[in-house]
Amino acid sequence: MSTISLSETLRATPASSFADPLATTPEAPTTSAGAIIKMSQTPLWEDSLPPILVAEDDPDDAYFIQRFIRKTGISNGVRLFSDGTEVVNFLGRVMAQAAGHRHRAPLLLFLDLKMAGLGGFGFLEWARAQKDLGPLTIVVLSKSSEPEDMARAMALGAHRYLVKYPSLATFATIIRSVYPPKVF
């Protein structure tokens, strides 16, 4: 029996599977162990709890970020996006439909800075210009420890800047500071 890495699994998935962040697809990519990797291919309002958003183009990093989030014990869904454009499209739909669903709108985004397509800086510029975005806490997770990147991200509206990978305790503290205990 051969083992396939997470990167190989996602590379083998057609790009069209990730093109529409709101498309519904019955088969999601899986890890070699068979665990489903939930990409952003679900309906807008997946469940009654607000999802945690993760924008990360590296499949291995996305997998580990999702595992860290799960290990905090939160029961909210996690939506993974491979670039900032997917997050913009998703949040655009959230803003358009939020009138009766504000209690389910996302409150937290973990954002990689250096992604293909619309990167983290581009997303932050877009988010800053949105008047109807609501209370979205944006936490940059980047491999860059350059002071210029940190300063620019914070100037563009990031709430926190963390160099990959912070501790599980840091993830838990951030999540609990954003989501009230009743959503755990």
Image: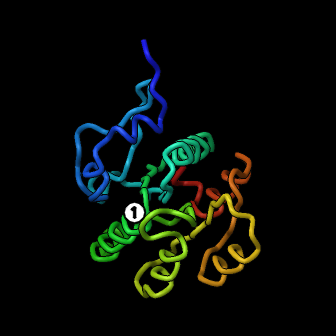
**In x, y percent, where is residue 111?**
55, 63
What secondary structure is marked by label 1? helix
Q: Residue furthest top?
A: 1
Q: Find disc 1 in the rendering and name its residue.
A: 104
Asked whether, in this view, residue 43 is left or right of residue 164, the answer is left
Quadrant containing the N terminus in the rendered view: top left
**In x, y percent, where is residue 103?**
41, 66
Asked whether, in this view, residue 155 is left or right of residue 53, the answer is right
**In x, y percent, where is residue 108?**
53, 64
**In x, y percent, where is residue 85?**
38, 69
Q: Residue at x 31, y 52 (%)?
A: 18
Of residues 59 and 75, the one nearer the viewer is 59
Q: Residue at x 59, y 82 (%)?
A: 156
Q: Residue at x 74, y 48 (%)?
A: 167
Relative to residue 180, is residue 138 depicted above or below? Answer: below
Relative to residue 45, is residue 34 depicted above or below? Answer: above
Residue 130 is drawn in which quadrant?
Answer: bottom left
